[in-house]
Image: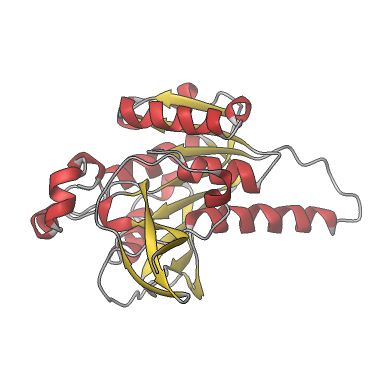
């Protein structure tokens, strides 16, 4: 019997931009449906775990901490926010902690942004995408879930933006993104279904897969609070590349804090933090 017991990321066709139902049989995962489609979803679906499954096996040799537990972008942000709140509560004189402000770059259907609003009820989210169809779909899903009052949805290309345009609620606690990260030379080898139905701009990360990643990281210091975090989904080859790039740009005051593995055990998610001056 085919059921929709799980909703997970399919990183091979744009990750957060579309949701796929995973076929399960007696609780055992088999395969993801290959048909890409814009998705409308319920609050129940947003509560389920979200994993990326794109990529091939490879080791990560970064000096940053490598976590063995399986993660996703939403759970990483929620855990970091929970840790910050616990740390504050342990203080002898706890300080007032403002509600977290989160920016999602490349919101697609809104799955990540709206999941964060559900899991962090005090949060506010700014969701941006350069594709108008994605922005419209995110807005539709936000209204369906009655979350529209806590989210700003912008038709916006961060490659041509200034920090001021994105600071609608002040400095950010988190930036989260599943950007285009496929190496250009790998685009031709993607499944035919992906090449036929997916917006290739949502996949192609340039020669090194880091075209948009570099843009996000260059913009991040002017958006984040001190100790604010960036959480990115990347290709399994990117952790060392990103760490080396950050070391070559010390003026950004960003450091790679942790690498987390996806559902298939591949290094997939990066936690990058802004250091205090």
Quadrant for residue 62, please give it.
bottom left
Query: Quick one: quadrant of the N terminus?
Result: bottom left
Q: Is residue 206 left or right of 136 when viewed as pictured?
A: left
> Relative to residue 112, is residue 67 depicted above or below?
below
* Residue, far front: 1
Query: Quick one: quadrant of the C terminus?
Result: top right
Q: Residue 274: in sight, yes or no?
A: no
Q: Nearer the viewer, residue 132 or 223?
A: 132
Residue 235 image point, x, y percent: 29, 61
Q: Residue at x 84, y 55 (%)?
A: 89
Q: How many marks?
A: 0
Residue 38 image point, x, y percent: 33, 40
Quadrant for residue 123, please give it.
top right
Q: Is residue 44 left or right of 188 when viewed as pictured?
A: right
Q: Residue 152: in sight, yes or no?
A: yes
> Relative to residue 228, is residue 131 depicted above or below?
above
* Residue, far right: 92
Quadrant for residue 91, please give it.
bottom right
Q: Nearer the viewer, residue 72 or 39?
A: 39
Q: Is residue 69 left or right of 25 when viewed as pictured?
A: right
Residue 205 image point, x, y percent: 22, 48
Q: Residue at x 48, y 75 (%)?
A: 27
Q: Is residue 194 left or right of 185 when viewed as pictured?
A: right
> Relative to residue 133, is residue 262 depicted above or below?
below
Residue 182 image point, x, y percent: 22, 54
Q: Residue at x 66, y 45 (%)?
A: 120
Q: How is the image coloured?
A: secondary structure
Q: Residue at x 10, y 60 (%)?
A: 189
Q: Nearer the viewer, residue 226 or 247?
A: 226
């Amino acid at each position: 019997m085919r059921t929709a017991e799980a909703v997970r990321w399919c990183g091979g066709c744009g990750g957060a931009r579309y949701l796929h139902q995973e076929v399960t049989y007696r609780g055992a995962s088999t395969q993801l449906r290959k048909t890409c489609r814009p998705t409308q979803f319920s609050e129940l679906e947003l509560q389920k775990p979200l994993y990326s499954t794109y990529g091939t096996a490879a080791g990560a040799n970064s000096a940053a901490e490598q976590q063995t537990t399986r993660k996703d972008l939403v759970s990483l942000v929620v855990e970091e926010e929970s840790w910050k709140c616990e740390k504050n509560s342990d203080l002898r004189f706890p300080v007032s902690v403002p509600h977290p402000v989160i920016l999602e770059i490349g919101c697609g259907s809104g799955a990540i942004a709206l999941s964060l609003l559900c899991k962090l009820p005090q949060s506010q989210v700014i969701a941006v995408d350069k594709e108008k169809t994605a922005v419209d779909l995110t807005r539709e899903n936000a209204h369906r879930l009655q979350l529209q009052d806590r989210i700003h949805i912008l038709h916006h290309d961060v490659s041509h933006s200034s920090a001021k345009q994105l600071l609608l609620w002040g400095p950010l606690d988190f930036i989260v993104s599943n950007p285009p990260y496929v190496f250009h030379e790998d685009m031709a080898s993607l499944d035919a279904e992906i090449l036929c139905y997916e917006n290739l701009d949502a996949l192609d990360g340039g020669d090194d897969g880091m075209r948009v990643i570099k843009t996000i990281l260059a913009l991040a210091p002017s958006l984040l609070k001190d100790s604010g975090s960036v959480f990115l989904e990347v290709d399994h080859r990117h952790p060392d590349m990103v760490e080396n790039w950050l070391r070559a740009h010390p003026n950004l005051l960003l450091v790679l804090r942790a690498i987390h593995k996806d559902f298939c055990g591949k290094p997939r998610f990066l936690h990058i933090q802004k250091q205090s001056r």
